[in-house]
Image: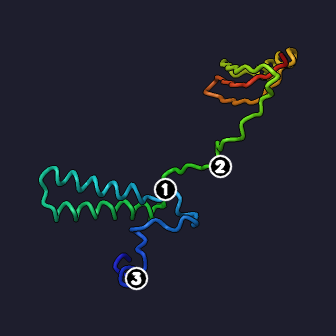
């Protein structure tokens, strides 16, 4: 396949990462293959292997890693920019008092509702919040705003 692609003047599938628009492109083993081949070359040269041998084994390592990635559809995880994208910062009224509240404890039914009731009784609003569960625990980070 590689020789055919070169003779037909096509980009060899084993040596390039497909077009970014193609769904299969995300996470393909392109850079890790190059890093693996370069590492193999460097290690072989460090231990006094001849240059032609180091080049050949480095190339074989690169093509091998890339080949396994393509044949087995192995991909690295990719960063999805839409997940966790920054939302606009909350607009905080200068006339109000603001407080950052961090809460941590066992994740039990009703804790968040109880906290919201306490804030509402104090005429406070939750301007921004982040909630995370870690095992059996819950962590809340709130920006609380209240009239002065």
Residue that badge 3 annotates: 9
Relative to 92, 137 lies left or right: left
Counting from the top left corner in percent of width and height, residue 68 is at 40, 61
Residue that badge 1 annotates: 75
Q: Quadrant of residue 88?
A: top right
In what element is the residue under mark 1? Answer: loop
Q: Quadrant of residue 95?
A: top right
Q: Earlier in the sequence, mark 2 or mark 3?
A: 3
User: What distance separates the C-alpha of mark 1 from that of mark 3?
Assistant: 27 Å
Q: The C terminus lies in which quarter of the figure?
A: top right
The local crowd at label 2, few if under 14, some if 14 to 19, many if 20 or more residues have their Cα within 10 Å, is few
In what element is the residue under mark 3? Answer: loop
In what element is the residue under mark 2? Answer: loop
Counting from the top left corner in percent of width and height, residue 139 is at 66, 24
Image position of 98 with respect to 80: above or below: above
Residue that badge 2 annotates: 82
Counting from the top left corner in percent of width and height, residue 10 is at 43, 79
- Give the residue drawn at x 66%, y 19%: 104
Whether the residues at callouts 1 and 2 have beta carbons within 8 Å, the answer is no
Q: Earlier in the sequence, mark 1 or mark 3?
A: 3
């Amino acid at each position: 396949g590689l020789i055919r692609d070169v003779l037909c003047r096509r980009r060899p599938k084993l040596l390039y990462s497909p077009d970014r628009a193609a769904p299969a492109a995300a996470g393909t083993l392109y850079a890790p293959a190059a890093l693996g081949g370069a590492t193999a070359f460097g290690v072989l040269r460090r231990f006094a292997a001849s240059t032609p041998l180091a080049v050949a084994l480095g190339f074989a390592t690169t093509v091998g890693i890339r080949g396994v990635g393509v044949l087995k559809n192995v991909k690295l995880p990719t960063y999805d920019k839409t997940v966790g994208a920054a939302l606009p910062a909350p607009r905080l009224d200068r006339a109000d008092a603001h407080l950052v509240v961090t809460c941590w404890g066992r994740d039990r039914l009703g804790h968040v509702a109880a906290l919201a009731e306490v804030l509402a009784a104090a005429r406070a609003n939750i301007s921004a919040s982040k909630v995370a569960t870690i095992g059996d625990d819950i962590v809340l980070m709130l920006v609380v705003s209240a009239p002065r």
